[in-house]
Amino acid sequence: MSKNVEISVKNIHVDDAFWNHRIENAVENVIPYQWRVLNDQQPGAAPSHAVMNFKIAAGLEKGEFYGYVFQDSDLAKWIEAASLSLIYKQDPQVMQNLEDVIGIIEKAQQPDGYLDTHYILKKPDKKWKEIAHGHELYCAGHMLEAAVAYYTVTGSDRLLKVMEKNVDLIRTIFGDEEGKLPSYPGHEEIELALMKAYRVTGQQKYMDLAEYFVNKRGHEPGFFQEESFIENSTRDKTMQKDYHQAHAPIREQKTAEGHAVRAMYYYTGAADVALENGDESLVEALRVLWKNVTNRRMYITGGVGSQGDGERFTIDYDLPNDTCYTETCAAVGMAMWGLRMLKIEPKSEYADVMERALYNNVLSGISEDGEHYFYVNPLMVKPDVANYRSDHISVETKRVRWFGCACCPPNVIRTLCGLGGYIYTQKEDAVYQHLYVGNEAVLSTSQGEIRLSCTSQMPWQGEASVTYHGPQGGKVFFRIPAYAKGFSICKEGNPVVYREENGYALVEGGLEDGCTYTISFEMEAQFILANPRVTEDCAKAAVLRGPLVYCAEEADNGPWLNDFRACLETPAELEKRDLFGGICGLKVSGSRSSMECWDADTLYLPAAKVCGREKASLHLIPYFLWNNRGEGEMLVWMNTEA
Amino acid sequence: MSKNVEISVKNIHVDDAFWNHRIENAVENVIPYQWRVLNDQQPGAAPSHAVMNFKIAAGLEKGEFYGYVFQDSDLAKWIEAASLSLIYKQDPQVMQNLEDVIGIIEKAQQPDGYLDTHYILKKPDKKWKEIAHGHELYCAGHMLEAAVAYYTVTGSDRLLKVMEKNVDLIRTIFGDEEGKLPSYPGHEEIELALMKAYRVTGQQKYMDLAEYFVNKRGHEPGFFQEESFIENSTRDKTMQKDYHQAHAPIREQKTAEGHAVRAMYYYTGAADVALENGDESLVEALRVLWKNVTNRRMYITGGVGSQGDGERFTIDYDLPNDTCYTETCAAVGMAMWGLRMLKIEPKSEYADVMERALYNNVLSGISEDGEHYFYVNPLMVKPDVANYRSDHISVETKRVRWFGCACCPPNVIRTLCGLGGYIYTQKEDAVYQHLYVGNEAVLSTSQGEIRLSCTSQMPWQGEASVTYHGPQGGKVFFRIPAYAKGFSICKEGNPVVYREENGYALVEGGLEDGCTYTISFEMEAQFILANPRVTEDCAKAAVLRGPLVYCAEEADNGPWLNDFRACLETPAELEKRDLFGGICGLKVSGSRSSMECWDADTLYLPAAKVCGREKASLHLIPYFLWNNRGEGEMLVWMNTEA
């Protein structure tokens, strides 16, 4: 494969009508809000203790460890997000907080490089003895990602030095050599972080360790001999090898199994390794897994993980809408993996999925005010049922301010602040624009610097303009989304000819310095059907417009949303709505039951005695906005007529 | 209310084309089979130890108690069933087994009358200290029912004497008097048993205790102060007061709550009490609960209990088809309660529900060979999903030979052997025939003996003949089922005029000695719709014919049953099927997806690109017969066109 050129997230400055207020909100409000939460200074939020754990480990405070074994990672993700936020605002307070907390982390690190506060404070004798469930490598991975982000944005290698020392320690612990653990992380994450460190430092040791973990996974003994693993595996079917993607070496895995976030992070890290070492057998394994996920196990929102118990993949076509998990973090992982696949081979099908995840299951994880979150992102909610039934226990019917297990909120924020990193990839001198998100980009090619200035009407309208500055005949490939109808490119207002390659359009002759290229396509609201093998979606349709999945809410439509049946013959109509600063809603025509014969105490009636159906319409809003107007029913897959 | 006349089950001998082989199988095979199971002599069945527990308590064997706290009740239900089986066959071996086991029980009983083997053997210091969960009164109730059945059929009061002594002990333990426990059973059952004992012995003490338990329930302190109750209630939301129907006195309960079997047994016992004491406030409470159950919380199969966790009722209209519990025992309870309501006030709506439960959710609990059972009776099964997902954990996809918790199998058998008891009720001299089940009956009225000889084509055809012998003008009311079309009565072949009363037909002038009355009605297959408030049944239909709910099985239709959509305009066609000795199947017309565009790796498609639907039909069999031909998909509520 032709060589990937890494684009620094620092060089892509998002400036976009749709995303700006989300990023601004993240930068202005959420970064400080989450800082208060992590410091236990936010009333109403679940206690975090994440900073305090480091302070105690650093000897700066007295106390005991509190939280999950992976509590450190919440802080790590915040450091990453806060570092990325500096791209948009050099907030002195945030910079000071970062400096201060890195100082604490430096002090918390033990002389040998060890850093995990859970084991330092609570189980010092169990270090590296609970690989299956201990999350030491997971936490190290997130802190390494944080260190890379901090270094990339600020140029300071303070945290990177801490983490280099930590990685050096890990290298002495894991490996096939005598006296080392021939094992790999219980929760993948460090693989992709090591690859980030490799790219910014060029140091081979990072890549070697990532490669080791990726390839070793699924081999015995791994962590299968551990007491904690054996103990758990007998009790709980979710604690099996496949829960950890460790049931087979990756090249023998044909289906995505187990904990969805772990799987996504693993595939992402493996793709990073394949991208650098060019191992075609690894790429092929990833293609097989990608197909399994996106063709049989992915929700239309880009969400993955069909079951709360084990937060996991289940079986092909098992996609229940009300009892799914579809964790926000897993959708972030889906987007990350898609981005890596695009770096390996720029095909628009990867971008279609990445975009779907970002605009739907990722964005639904955060409220419009930025301070309320979803961990689980179902496609159908009846609050009374969800709050009663024990098989809906994972589902929250109202966004919450924080979680005891708080992986998702900072994950969304780092994704928002790092959104620039998802827009382009580059293969040698060819630049691929995957997302029509307004931005200013500076890219390097062997022919010289390219500057792209993009404005966009997405996701409401299929139009974006890109002004190109750079070498004559610049190779910038514009994505032709699967949903685009009548895709065209104009140069300074005049249509130009383009050729299509793997779902990307390249203007004949390349781009001309100083010219503005306008990309236009229609985005019709589309009724989408699911494969008849998907029990839960049979006789139902979802509505997509562009990258956005739509949903019906009780706030617009009253209760009993499932009674509505959409008429698929009548196209959904665009409705301008004043909600949330102005959005494109949709109106779907169809019918509802006449309720005359259905009083509250009539449970069953012969069809012949039912008084029929009345014309009705359903007002839809984008899925990511659901539950910003209080608790109520929500529905993505609606019943259909005929 | 006019006085109920109790009809002895011994006086109704079922002789019916549909039921005979089921009862014969129960008598010939299942009673001996279950005896072997209870004696741990049946290979392949889960261990029971129920008889051994009594032997150990009797000092006849050494060993330890094994099983659930309610293990004794499995044996009690077998004794009841075996006693009832003697109506049909005076099997010397069964009679001997009964004598022997009663001898063991006599020996196991302690001098003060105490009998529960779990507490005798395992927790002697906890007798009457764990009322909430200990099941002592539940086991006593079942043994008392067994004693009444044994006495009724054989005339021997050996077991009844044991149980009278046991009840006398219970009377010294429970009550409002100083030093007694002002409490009531954790699991209701003894109330209805006490009322049976009251009826056969005429002893007021039985009824007094039943009345006490029924009315005391829901009052504090009950068992709410018990350690075991408090402990559990903090851990588990199912272990709350409402789980035990103890959240309020019965007259203040407006909805059916908690564990479905407990609720059914409670309402049955309460109805028995109301029937005898004529307390209109109690009758009214039961009417309110009946309406709540049958109008908002009952499956079309007569099943109740929408959730496996807590085996319980949930909320109005929450009727999921794949994750329901609908325990066989709860359906038995539904039938028992219906029968009691008929005794209070003969209205055919009670009989409609009783019949629905018996022919569907009760009968589905036992295989055609009589030796394989369902505990949980879902209305939709996808085996791969049910076997994988943890929220389907209660669902068995194959009938099993026995259960560790084995309440259901003997419950079905005692119901089959006691089926005669469900056919008629009597108010003073008026006899009501609720079920068209062939039988020979001997009834007493103030005018003299009535003999009824009934033959029936039900449930396959709406025809039954009743030959009447007895006083001139006999008042026998024939039920007009809700599903009957063109109900008519002929006397010796000639139509006669009848008047209708609460859904029952009384021939003008009453019945004539020696005459045969033929009841005829059409039973069309009906598409049934559910209230739009029932999310899971929206845009779906079930098919009923007479009392039978129908279902589609993979064995007849291939997989992906949910893809089928029924055309409700085309009536379902009757199909004679050779299965199971000859049944009426049904064929429903409709459509299936053309699968050309839906290969296994196409998950979603725009509706406009879907290649359409093909005409298809679905072959249905009666629900109670499902899973007699191996594992496969099963579906009651099918999607519909338009």
Image: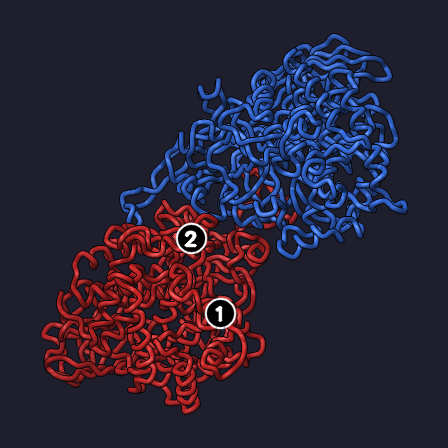
Chain colours: A red, B blue
Residue B474: quarter of image: top right
Tell me if label 1 and label 2 are in contact, CB under 8 Å: no
Q: Earlier in the sequence, mark 1 or mark 2?
A: 1
At label 1, the amino acid type is Lys
Residue A208: x and y, percent?
22, 67
Do marks 1 and 2 both belong to one polypeptide chain? yes
Residue B403: quarter of image: top right
Can you name the residue that lies furthest to the right here? B178
Give the quadrant of the N terminus of chain A.
bottom left
Can you name the residue that lies furthest to the bottom here? A92
Q: Chain of mark 1?
A: A
Residue A432: x and y, percent?
20, 72
The local secondary structure at tag 1 comes to loop
Q: Which mark is residue A122?
A: 1
The crowding category of the residue bearing disc 2, from other C-alpha atoms within 10 Å (few below 14, some 14 to 19, many at least 20), is: many
Q: Which mark is residue A239?
A: 2
Can you name the residue that lies furthest to the top here? B514
Q: What residue is shown at x 68% (from left), y 28% (from top)? A: B54
Q: What residue is shown at x 23% (from left), y 74% (from top)? A: A198
Q: What residue is shown at x 29% (from left), y 75% (from top)? A: A421
The crowding category of the residue bearing disc 1, from other C-alpha atoms within 10 Å (few below 14, some 14 to 19, many at least 20), is: few
At label 2, the amino acid type is Met
